[in-house]
Amino acid sequence: MTGRNQTVISEFLLLGLPIESEQQDMFYALFLAMYLTTVLGNLLIIILIRLDSYLHTPMYSFLSNLSFSDICFSSVTIPKLLQNMQSQDLSISYAGCLTQMYFFLFFANLDSFLLVTMAYDRYVAICFPLHYSTIMSTKLCLSLVVLSWVLTTFHAMLHTLLMARLCFCADNVIPHFFCDVSALLKLSCSDTRVNELVIFFIGGIIVIIPFLLIILSYARIVFSVLKFPSGGGICKAFSTCGSHLSVVSLLYGTVIGLYFCPSANNSPVKEIAMAVMYTVVTPMLNPFIYSLRNRDMKGALGRVFCRNKILFSL
Ligand SMILES: *[C@@H]1O[C@H](CO)[C@@H](O)[C@H](O)[C@H]1NC(C)=O
């Protein structure tokens, strides 16, 4: 790299969304609305699950963890995007960029591990209903959550440290709305082969295995429901699993398409649209799909509000 103008870069420029400046206001409002929906929807779920003792079950404690992770996940990217859109200042410091990348990977992974845990939980509940409470003990639930946190810490740390090794020379313009691993790799002027290999193998394991486990869980649920058919049971299982699977495929489909398929023919606009799908849209949809169309949650909403109404009127 001798002879190259090696200025050390202290900040990056995030170009944001590929939109015209007259559309800026509309997109600002849209993303603000989606962010607020995500935060409020997920917060409502966490509060309901805390307050209502009927919801103190493994399934809802995982859901509450998922909601927490979704709030954090969308808070890693959207506030910065909104701030950049508002101030027209596109810069993000080098440290800020790596920090954003770390937390982005962290919460994206945590989401995916929690989705696996939830699929496993449903699998046990539907296929072994009599042993559910002995299998899904408090200890196992806590271990699964702790294991998710530990694995995702190491994985996010690995990618972030590998990224911190790289040099960035003249080009500091990221054509994206957050510090994305693959966008940063393209900017680097060092050898990125190790990073690419790690993304491909470790990242592949971290993405593909949860995805397969989820599909396996739901497949076994479907088989066990089909083996002992009862009119209402099939409908209920299919509507639950179908909606879960739609979120799962939206999340994994976009992630796999973005990071593991050759990106030479992906236009930047398409890449950003796919990134918006899994960074903004899935955290917003999760609470609705996993809970708000669910009878227990609606019951809890009623109970919590009625109790508070009585408290206030006293
Ligand atoms: C996450 O799950 C664990 C284990 O079930 C539970 O103890 C904890 O309260 C949950 N955390 C949140 C924020 O709901």
Image (tube, rainbow, N blue to C red):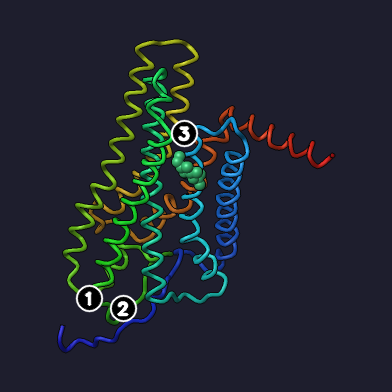
Q: Indicate which label's residue lies in the foreground, 2 or 3.
A: 3
Marker disc for residue 58:
3
Q: Earlier in the sequence, mark 2 or mark 3?
A: 3
For image coordinates 39% across by 49% down, the residue present is 110
For image coordinates 36% across by 69% down, the residue present is 98
* Residue 160 visible (yes or no): yes
Q: Name which quarter of the figure residue 140 lies in.
A: top left
Give whichever of 21, 142 is nearer the camera.
142
Q: Position of residue 212 (x, y in %)?
A: 28, 36
Q: Position of residue 40 (x, y in %)?
A: 60, 49
Dot 3 lies on which element?
helix
> Could you give the CA–CA distance between mark 2 and mark 1, rounded to whole angstroms?
9 Å
Dot 2 lies on which element?
loop
Q: Name which quarter of the figure residue 14 lies in.
A: bottom left
- Residue picked out by circle 1: 189
> Could you give the CA–CA distance between mark 2 and mark 3, rounded to whole angstroms?
49 Å
Q: Amino acid at mark 3?
A: Pro
